[in-house]
């Protein structure tokens, strides 16, 4: 689904905020342009690279789980101006699902812009109330023995899921593994599967 154009009042409010920040010397036009360019460059491939590396490099994985921001920076990803990144490790018995119940908080530096459904009031409320039903609508049906943990991304902390490495990927290269991981896996609404072609629908 195409994203909605911004409303006129939002555009006017943003222009006033920008003007006020510039008048006070808090930001420059150049800094705003740089931030917009880095936001536009960010995409789920970055998070996918991080997951693939964690699957094949135990030391990197340990750093990623300890301090997601430091791990991203160590891969050359600028996390400047972003809230801390936390990484949720799925196991055979625990699955993680990420939501921002308030608005649309999302680790944009490593996944890019959030999809429209992530910002919808339906997802924001139902992910907490009935996570298994929401997962099922994404085609993800977990065994009854798997616990679902729902984490709230906030202005202070952003979450990314580290899914289980799919069976059948033994011996795969880092690039092959990266190609397997999509935005939806990084949020936890679906699971990577070596047998199906990764979908990158917007
Ligand atoms: Fe938010």
Image: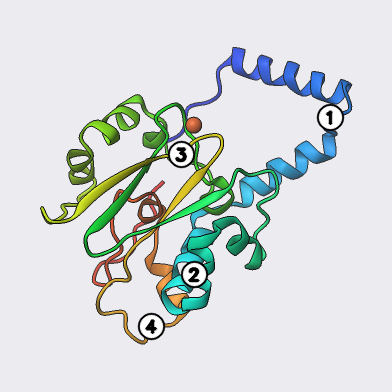
Find disc 4 in the rendering and name its residue: 172
Please give the label number shown on residue 26: 1
What secondary structure is found at the residue carrying circle 3? loop
The disc, 1 or 3, on the residue closer to the chain's N-terminal end is 1
- Examine the image and state in which quarter residue 39 appears: top right
Q: Marks 2 and 4: which is nearer the front? A: 2
Instruction: State whether residue 59 is above or below residue 35.
Output: below
Q: Do the CB atoms of the residues marked 2 and 1 lie less than 8 Å apart?
A: no
The disc, 3 or 4, on the residue closer to the chain's N-terminal end is 3
Find disc 3 in the rendering and name its residue: 153
Q: Is ligand 1 less than 8 Å from the beta carbon at label 3?
A: yes
Q: Marks 2 and 3: which is nearer the front? A: 2
Residue at image point 48% right, 78% down: 57
Q: Do the CB atoms of the residues marked 1 and 3 lie less than 8 Å apart?
A: no
The disc, 1 or 4, on the residue closer to the chain's N-terminal end is 1
Give how far across and how far down residue 89 sits, in percent. Answer: 37, 60
Find disc 2 in the rendering and name its residue: 62
Disc 1 to disc 3, C-alpha distance: 27 Å
Instruction: State whether residue 51 is above or below residue 44.
Output: below
The disc, 2 or 1, on the residue closer to the chain's N-terminal end is 1
What secondary structure is found at the residue carrying circle 1? loop
The disc, 2 or 4, on the residue closer to the chain's N-terminal end is 2
> How many C-alpha atoms fall within 10 Å of the one at disc 2: few (<14), some, or many (≥20)?
few
> How many C-alpha atoms fall within 10 Å of the one at disc 3: few (<14), some, or many (≥20)?
many
Q: Is ligand 1 less than 8 Å from the beta carbon at label 1?
A: no
Give how far across and how far down residue 59 sits, in percent. Answer: 51, 76
Disc 3 to disc 4, C-alpha distance: 32 Å
């Amino acid at each position: 689904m195409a994203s909605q154009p911004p409303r006129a009042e939002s555009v006017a409010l943003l222009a006033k905020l920008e003007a006020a920040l510039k008048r006070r010397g808090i930001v420059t036009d150049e800094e705003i342009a740089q931030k917009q360019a880095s936001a536009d460059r960010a995409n789920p491939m970055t998070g996918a690279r991080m997951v693939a590396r964690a699957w094949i490099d135990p030391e990197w994985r340990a750093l990623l789980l300890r301090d997601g921001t430091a791990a991203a920076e160590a891969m050359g990803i600028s996390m400047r101006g972003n809230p801390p990144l936390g990484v949720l490790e799925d196991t055979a018995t625990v699955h993680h699902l990420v939501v921002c119940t308030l608005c649309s908080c999302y680790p944009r530096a490593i996944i890019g812009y959030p999809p429209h459904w992530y910002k919808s009031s339906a997802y924001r409320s139902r992910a907490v109330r009935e996570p298994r039903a929401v997962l099922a609508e994404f085609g993800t049906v977990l065994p009854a023995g798997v616990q679902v943990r729902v984490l709230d991304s906030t202005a202070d902390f952003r979450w990314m899921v580290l899914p289980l490495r799919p069976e059948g990927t033994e011996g795969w290269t880092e690039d092959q593994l990266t190609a397997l991981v999509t935005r939806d896996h990084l949020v936890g609404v679906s699971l990577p599967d070596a047998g199906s072609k990764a979908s990158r629908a917007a």
